[in-house]
Amino acid sequence: MGTSWHRGFDRIYWLTISHRYGYNRYVIFFQRNFSWILIVFVFFSLVLSAMQVGSGLKELEDNYAFLRASYVFVVFSMVRIRSSMIHKRK
């Protein structure tokens, strides 16, 4: 067993090293996967923006099928993002 200052020094060293290696893993991840992440982000942004504009038009504000499809896609988008965040954590 070490003294209390040894334990504190070990914690600081561990946090510094783990942060450094964790950062390198994220850099490698984004280097390998940036293009498809960008494509998915742009696709969802365009579709959600188009649906938002469409729901504001007088011609589509009473269209139940369009509003239902917009609602389903928005909920799907949120659930998909949340599930991917949970999956990555495990």
Image (tube, rainbow, N blue to C red):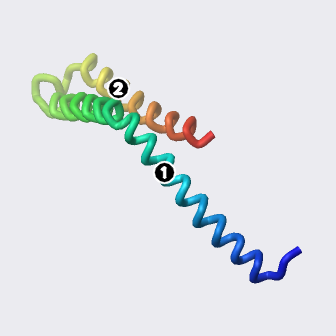
Number of numbered callouts drawn: 2
Label number found at residue 44: none
Q: Name the residue under label 1.
A: 24
Give the side of residue 17 with respect to residue 82, left or right.
right
Q: Which of 71 and 90 is in front in this view?
A: 90
Q: Which of 62 and 27 is in front in this view?
A: 27
Tell me if residue 68 comes above or below residue 49 in the rendering: above
Instruction: Look at 10% across and 28% down and name the residue there.
Output: 58
* Crowd rating for badge 1 (residues with CA inside 10 Å; few <14, some 14–19, many 20+): few
Q: Position of residue 14 (x, y in %)?
A: 66, 65
Instruction: Look at 79% across and 81% down and name the residue there.
Output: 4
Tell me if residue 35 comes above or below residue 9 in the rendering: above
Marks 1,2: beta carbons within 8 A: no
Tell me if residue 68 comes above or below residue 38 in the rendering: above
The amino acid marked with disc number 1 is: Asn
The amino acid marked with disc number 2 is: Phe
Instruction: Look at 51% across and 40% down and name the residue there.
Output: 85
Q: Mark 2 points at which residue?
A: 73
* Crowd rating for badge 2 (residues with CA inside 10 Å; few <14, some 14–19, many 20+): some
